[in-house]
Amino acid sequence: IVGVDVDGNTYIVVLLTEVSLYEAMNKLTGLKIPFTQAINLDGGPSTGIYKNWNGENFWHEGYNKVPSIIRFKKKSHVPAAEPVRP
């Protein structure tokens, strides 16, 4: 799960066990972080990952090929997101 809080901080939340979307929501709200946005990235055989952190590289391309990616890049300043109202 990728979430953004009221201050514009980005979180990557990894659940190490299989859960339903409802259970994932309960775990996320149980963190007591004031999220304004969150998106579930379900994993599965098409999930790949590339990491370059402090000069250390890691690459796993996944088992199925897909024509899209989500990329995270650190920015020097990101304004806080507006809270999402139901």
Image (tube, helix red, strand yellow):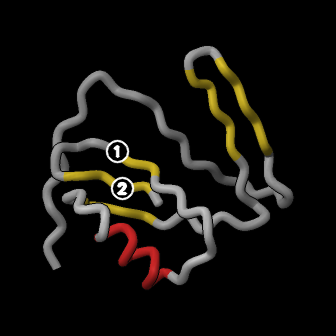
Q: Which mark is residue 51?
A: none
> Residue 48 at what x, y percent from top left?
72, 49
- Looking at the picture, how far across and down is residue 10, in whole percent? 34, 45
Give the quarter of the image for residue 56. Answer: top right
On the picture, is 53 further left or further right than 13?
right
Residue 2: quadrant of the picture: bottom left
Alpha-carbon neighbours of circle 1 within 10 Å: few (<14), some, or many (≥20)? some
Mark before the other along the chain sequence, 1 or 2: 2
Q: Nearer the viewer, residue 24 or 78?
A: 24
Q: Is residue 49 above or below residue 76?
A: below
Q: Are marks 1 and 2 in contact (CB under 8 Å)?
A: yes
Callout 2: 10 Å neighbours few (<14), some, many (20+)? some
Dot 1 falls on a residue whose secondary structure is strand
Residue 77 left/right relative to 57:
left
Query: What residue lies at 45% left-to-right and 81% top-to-bottom?
Result: 23
Residue type beneath disc 2? Gly
| Number of numbered discs | 2
Position of 11 compared to 45: left or right?
A: left
Pick the quarter of the image with the C terminus. bottom left
31 w.r.t. 8: above or below: below
* Residue type at the position of mark 1: Thr
Q: Where's residue 35, x and y in %? A: 25, 59
Which residue is found at the position 38% from the left and 76% from the top?
25
| In the depicted structure, whether residue 77 falls above or below residue 43 | above
Q: Residue at x 39, y 71 (%)?
A: 27
Q: Residue furthest toward the right?
A: 63
Q: CA distance from mark 1 to mark 2?
A: 6 Å
The residue that mark 1 highlights is 10
Q: Secondary structure at mark 2?
A: strand
Task: Report the residue that reaches farthest toward the top.
Answer: 55
Q: Nearer the viewer, residue 39 or 32?
A: 32
Mark 2 sits on what residue? 3
